[in-house]
Each structure stands twice: as C-alpha cells, then as structure tokens.
Amino acid sequence: MLVALGVDYNIFLMSRIWDETVRLGLKHRTREAVGRTGGVFTSAGIILAGTFAAVMPLPLRDLVQLGFAVAIGVLLDTFVVRTVLVPAIVLLLGRRNWWPSRV
C-alpha cells in the first residue's frame, strides 16, 4: 500500500530528472529536479500523512494501527526515499539508469 502511494511521486521526480537531461549534466540535473519538485512533494506527503493520521483518534485499535503505520510510512517515503534514496540511486547508476530507453 505504501509503495502504491509513493510510486506516483517517484515517477514524477524521475520524469523531471529526464526533462532536465537536455540542459544539464547528471549531477546537476538531479539536484535541479529534486529542488524544483521538493516543495510540492513534501507538501503532498505531509498532507497525505495527516489524512491517514486523522483516523488515529477513532476508538478502533485496528484503524489506529493502520493510520499510524501508513502515516509514518508516507513520511519516511517523503523525507528519506524521495529526497535521498532515489537521487542517490540515479547518481550511482548513471547512464544505466535510463535503460532500456536512451537519453
């Protein structure tokens, strides 16, 4: 469920990196893409985490656990995966990152 919630934003980030490919080098285009999309994605992640956290005050233990787990997972995806892990993998893979297509 968490992967499905976060994959859209990762696709948007990768397409932004792809768009910057024409103008800049890999390191600079990755930094530029994360910088341009960071505010929007961070806001969306906080709002989504808040939405799932809103079910935590309910008296149902299962919903409290689900709301907590999904809210924490969305925040981890927002602040760790999308801002650190995805750009690091892009930089480590280099040109192989775009396989099987070509830049």
Image (spheres, grey):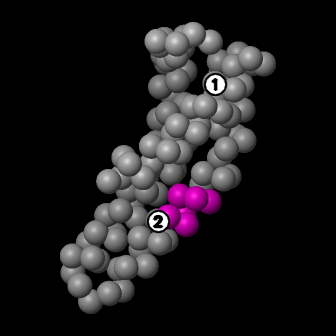
Q: Which is nearer the eye, 78 or 4?
A: 4
Magenta segment includes 45:
yes
Q: Which class describes the residues within 10 Å of circle 1: few (<14), some (14-19), or many (20+)?
A: some
**Residue in the image at 45% along x and 43% along y:** 7
Q: Residue furthest bottom?
A: 59
Residue 71 pos. (x, y %) = 40, 65
Q: Where is residue 24 in the image (x, y as percent from the top left)?
A: 75, 18
64 relative to 11, above or below: below
Quarter occupied by residue 66: bottom left
Q: Is residue 80 visible?
A: no
- x 51%, y 39%: residue: 10
- Magenta-highlighted residues: 43-48
Residue under numbered circle 2: 49
The reply to whether residue 89 is in sight is yes
* Disc 2 secondary structure class: helix
Of the two numbered discs 1 and 2 on the same chain, state the one appearing first in sequence: 1
The amino acid type, in three-letter code, at marker 2 is: Ala
The x, y position of residue 30, in whole percent, is 64, 28
Q: Is residue 66 magenta?
A: no
- Identify which amino acid the numbered label 1 is placed on: Trp
Rounded to the nearest angstrom, the CA distance separating label 1 from label 2 is: 28 Å
Pick the front one: 99 or 58: 99
- Image x and y of residue 44, in percent: 58, 59
Q: Where is 98 relative to 50, above or below?
A: above
Q: Residue at x 52, y 37 (%)?
A: 11
Tell me the number on the disc at residue 18: 1
